[in-house]
Amino acid sequence: MSKQKGLLYDSTMCVGCGECYNACKKQNKLKDTNSDFLKDHLSADTYTVVEQHGDLYARKMCMHCTKPTCASVCPVGAFEKSKEGAVIYDAEKCIGCRYCMQACPHQIPRYEWSSTNPRVRKCIMCHDRVAKGLPSACSEACPTGATKFGDMDELIAEAKQRLKDSPDTYYQHIYGLEEAGGGNVLVLASVPFEKLGYTPNLPKEALPELTGRVMEKIPTIVAAGGVFLGSMHWLTKRKNQIAREKRDEQLKRNEH
């Protein structure tokens, strides 16, 4: 049985060169979307971005959750956790409901608003390459080793060792190891992760398990109500964000 694969992104080693961004574009045959990659945003044609936060950099991409919420809410099974570890997407099954976009705790999936046959788009961790025994394109292109591809158990051990060996270099937390149940993308940084734009205060449990348990116990446990209402607030906020993205895409098309 093959081991789960994943990515370890170490922000302290990132120089903001954008080679990961360019490699992703080339691998997935994505359109150019911004002349300055540091100012680009996730979109249907941009699966990963490099953001600048002062003198620090941060990559954003699908975190490939261990128990992906996008898959749990999809009514037609368009999302699937592969045996290699990536969360992959089957456009042939997708009906365009976009529940996945509202449910993602990391706010990653994007939609082809301008297409007559729209799809949901996001990083699939180079699933085809990985299935052939190759590393992801972004990790292969990284000149500093800031993005490393490998077996998940080895990446977790390495991340923990880096924190132990260099306590003054790192904020003592591995982002992605426990957030929303954990996933196959781990992040190290020198500062608290919310300062780099990562979603803070996510529960440690996978959201499908959390929401499922809350729904089972309503109305018998009043305390669970707060969690449920919090989840509904988050979903509403996410729905409004998606609507703004759609409006912005429409404005861009009108300008052209």
Image (spheres, helix red, strand yellow):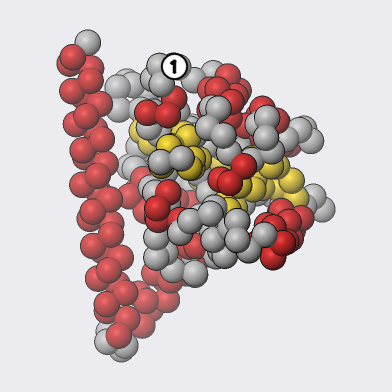
Q: Position of residue 88 (x, y in %)?
A: 56, 41
Please tell me how crowded label 1 is: few (under 14), some (14-19), or many (20+) other residues with Cα within 10 Å: few
247 to the left or right of 197:
left
In the image, residue 206 sits, relative to residue 115, either above or below, namely below
Residue at horizontal 43 percent and vertical 37 percent from the top: 51
In the image, residue 232 sits, relative to residue 63, either above or below, namely below
In the image, residue 248 sits, relative to residue 174, either above or below, namely above
Q: Residue furthest top?
A: 256
42 to the left or right of 224:
right
Residue at horizontal 72 percent and vertical 35 percent from the top: 135
Q: Position of residue 136 (x, y in %)?
A: 67, 34
SS of the residue at dot 1?
Answer: loop
Q: Nearer the viewer, residue 251 or 154?
A: 154
Residue at horizontal 58 percent and vertical 30 percent from the top: 20
Residue labelled with disc 1? 32
Q: Nearer the viewer, residue 168 or 235?
A: 168
Q: Position of residue 114 (x, y in %)?
A: 30, 22
Q: Nearer the viewer, residue 17 or 247?
A: 17
